[in-house]
Image (cartoon, rainbow, N blue to C red):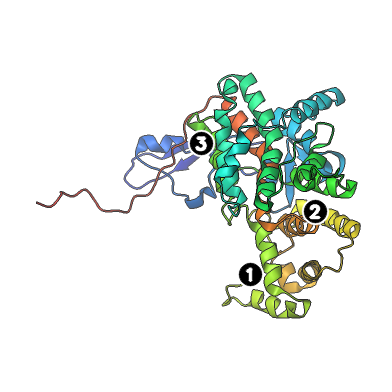
C-alpha cells in the first residue's frame, strides 16, 4: 500500500475530497472511497465491476494476460505438480504443505467423509426428479443442525473443523444426490481411496461389486476439482463473504454460495455447453450455427467460448484440454457424435479469424463439460460438481474474512423511486 492520494472535486462541496490510493502486490490500484459517506455521497457501480469490496491474499486473476494465481502459484503449475487436496491446504493456510503436513491433512479430510446417518432420511422428502442443486442447498444448510459442536466462528479451531467437514462431506452429499435420482443405494465413502477415486466410487459403485475407476479418469476428476477450486471474488464467493459478514454459521454461508452458483449465468456454463452441442446435433450443421453465432442480430451464442474475466486464453482451459484428450482416448469415445461436434467447434475457434480477433477461445467450461459427459455424469450434476470443487474457495474466503477485523456488508443504492408523499385521505 502507498500514501498516495486522489482528489475528488464535486459541485457544491467547497474543497476537494482527498481519498487514499492503495496498491496491492498485483493488479490495479484502488481508491478508498469510505470517506464519501461522511460527505453524503456514495459511489455508483452496478455489478461491482469497478469496486474492491475486500482485501484478500488468496487468489489473483489478470484477465488480460490470462493469469490465475493461488497464493502466488500459477494454476498451470499446480495442475501439473499438485493435486486437489494439496491445493485445498494451500488455499486455507497460505503455503504448500510439507509431506508430513499433507499426509495429516489428507488423513483428516478422508476421515470426515461420512455424513450423519439421519441426513440420509432427508432424501426421502425430495422427489426423485428434484434438481440435485436444490437438494444440495437444503442438505448443506442442514449440516449445522448436526454439527453444531463447532459453530463458534470467533474460534480459529472451530473454523478449521468446519473447513475439514465441508471439504470432506461435499462429495458424499453430491454422490447421494445422484444415487437418489436413479434409485440406487447410497455408497458409503472409503477412507483408503483418494479424494477423486472416492467420489467416483460413491457415484458409480454399487454394493454388488467393487468399482475401481481408471487412474486416467480419477486424475481427470481431480483436475476438474483443482481447476475450479477458487476464482477470486465471483458472484458465489462474494455471496459467501456477504452472508458470513452477518455472523451466519459456515454451513449456511456455503449453502448461500451454492444457491448463487446455481444461477445459469454463473455455474451453469458447462451444462449450457452440452445443451448447445445437443441443439447442433450433427457435424453437418456446424457451419449453420457458426454463421448464426457471427450474426449480431441472432440471439444464438456458442457456449463455452470466451470468458467475462479472461480477455485472453483461460489458463485453466489449456490443462483441461489435455485432460479431455486423455479421457476420450482412455474411454475410446473420440468418435462419439456430440464429442466430435465439440472437437470440430474447438478447431474452428482456434483457426477462424472471427473468433481469434475477438479472443473467443474455448474456456474451462467447454472442456470440463465434455469430460464429465464422457465419464458418464449427467448434465444436471455438472453444477453440483462445480459446487464440490468451489467449496474450498468459499470456505477459505469465509475463514479469511473472520480472521481479521470485519464488519457486516451493507451495499448502498441510487434511489429513483417516489419522493415522500402522504397517504390519501
Q: Nearer the viewer, residue 313 or 145?
A: 145
Q: Which residue is mark 2?
A: 320
Q: Residue at x 50, y 31 (%)?
A: 248
Q: Residues within 10 Å of mark 2 (few under 14, many from 20)?
A: many
Query: Residue 337: horizontal and vertical position, in percent?
Result: 80, 71
- Between the residue at mark 1 and the residue at mark 2, the CA separation in whole angstroms equals 22 Å
Helix, strand or loop for disc 2: helix
Up-down: is 107 above or below 217?
Answer: above
Report if the CB atoms under discs 1 and 2 are less than 8 Å apart: no
Specify whether 334 is left or right of 341. Answer: right
Q: Residues within 10 Å of mark 1 (few under 14, many from 20)?
A: some
Q: Which residue is mark 1?
A: 301
Q: Which residue is mark 3?
A: 243
Q: Nearer the viewer, residue 254 or 188?
A: 188
Q: Residue at x 86, y 63 (%)?
A: 333
Specify whether 36 is left or right of 314. Answer: left
Residue 269, picture quadrant: bottom right
- Quadrant of the frame with the N terminus: top right
Answer with mark 3 or mark 2, whichever residue precedes in sequence: 3
Answer with mark 1 or mark 3, whichever residue precedes in sequence: 3
Q: Which residue is most to the front?
A: 208
Query: Residue 222: horizontal and vertical position, in percent?
Result: 80, 44
Badge number at residue 360: none
Amino acid at each position: 500500500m502507498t500514501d498516495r492520494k486522489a482528489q475528488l472535486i464535486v459541485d457544491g462541496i467547497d474543497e476537494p475530497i482527498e481519498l487514499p490510493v492503495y496498491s496491492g502486490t498485483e493488479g490495479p490500484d484502488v481508491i478508498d472511497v469510505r470517506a464519501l459517506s461522511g460527505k453524503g455521497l456514495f459511489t455508483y457501480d452496478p455489478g461491482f465491476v469497478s469496486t474492491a469490496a475486500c482485501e484478500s491474499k488468496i487468489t489473483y486473476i489478470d484477465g488480460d494476460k490470462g493469469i490465475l494465481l493461488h497464493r502466488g502459484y500459477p494454476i498451470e503449475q499446480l495442475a501439473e505438480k499438485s493435486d486437489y487436496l494439496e491445493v485445498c491446504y494451500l488455499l486455507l493456510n497460505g503455503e504448500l504443505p510439507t509431506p508430513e503436513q499433507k499426509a495429516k491433512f489428507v488423513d483428516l479430510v478422508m476421515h470426515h467423509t461420512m455424513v450423519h446417518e439421519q441426513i440420509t432420511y432427508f432424501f426421502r422428502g425430495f422427489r426423485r426428479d428434484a434438481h440435485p442443486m436444490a437438494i444440495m442447498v437444503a442438505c448443506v444448510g442442514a449440516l449445522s443442525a448436526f454439527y453444531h459442536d463447532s459453530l463458534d466462528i470467533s474460534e480459529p479451531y472451530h473454523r478449521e473443523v468446519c473447513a475439514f467437514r465441508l471439504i470432506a462431506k461435499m462429495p458424499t452429499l453430491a454422490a447421494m444426490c445422484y444415487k437418489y435420482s436413479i434409485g440406487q443405494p447410497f455408497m458409503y465413502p472409503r477412507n483408503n481411496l483418494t479424494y477423486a477415486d472416492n467420489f467416483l466410487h460413491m457415484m458409480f459403485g454399487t454394493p454388488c461389486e467393487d468399482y475401481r475407476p481408471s487412474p486416467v479418469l480419477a486424475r481427470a476428476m481431480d483436475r476438474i476439482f483443482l481447476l475450479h477450486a477458487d476464482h477470486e471474488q465471483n458472484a458465489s464467493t462474494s455471496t459467501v463473504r456477504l452472508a458470513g459478514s452477518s455472523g451466519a454459521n459456515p454451513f449456511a454461508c456455503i449453502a448461500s454460495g451454492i444457491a448463487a452458483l446455481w444461477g445459469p449465468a454463473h455455474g451453469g456454463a458447462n451444462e449450457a455447453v452440452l445443451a448447445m452441442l445437443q441443439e447442433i446435433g450433427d457435424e453437418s450443421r456446424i457451419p449453420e450455427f457458426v454463421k448464426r453465432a457471427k450474426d449480431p442480430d441472432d440471439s444464438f451464442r456458442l457456449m463455452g467460448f470466451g470468458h467475462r474475466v479472461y480477455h485472453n486464453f483461460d489458463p485453466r482451459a489449456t490443462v483441461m484440454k489435455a485432460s479431455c484428450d486423455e479421457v476420450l482416448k482412455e474411454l475410446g469415445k473420440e468418435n462419439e457424435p456430440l464429442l466430435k461436434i465439440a472437437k470440430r467447434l474447438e478447431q474452428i475457434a482456434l483457426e477462424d479469424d472471427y473468433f481469434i480477433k475477438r479472443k473467443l477461445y474455448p474456456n474451462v467450461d467447454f472442456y470440463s463439460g465434455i469430460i464429465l459427459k464422457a465419464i458418464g455424469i449427467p448434465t444436471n450434476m455438472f453444477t453440483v460438481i462445480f459446487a464440490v470443487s468451489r467449496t474450498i474457495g468459499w470456505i477459505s474466503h469465509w475463514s479469511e474474512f473472520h480472521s481479521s477485523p470485519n464488519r457486516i456488508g451493507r451495499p448502498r443504492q441510487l434511489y429513483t423511486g417516489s419522493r415522500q408523499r402522504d397517504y390519501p385521505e
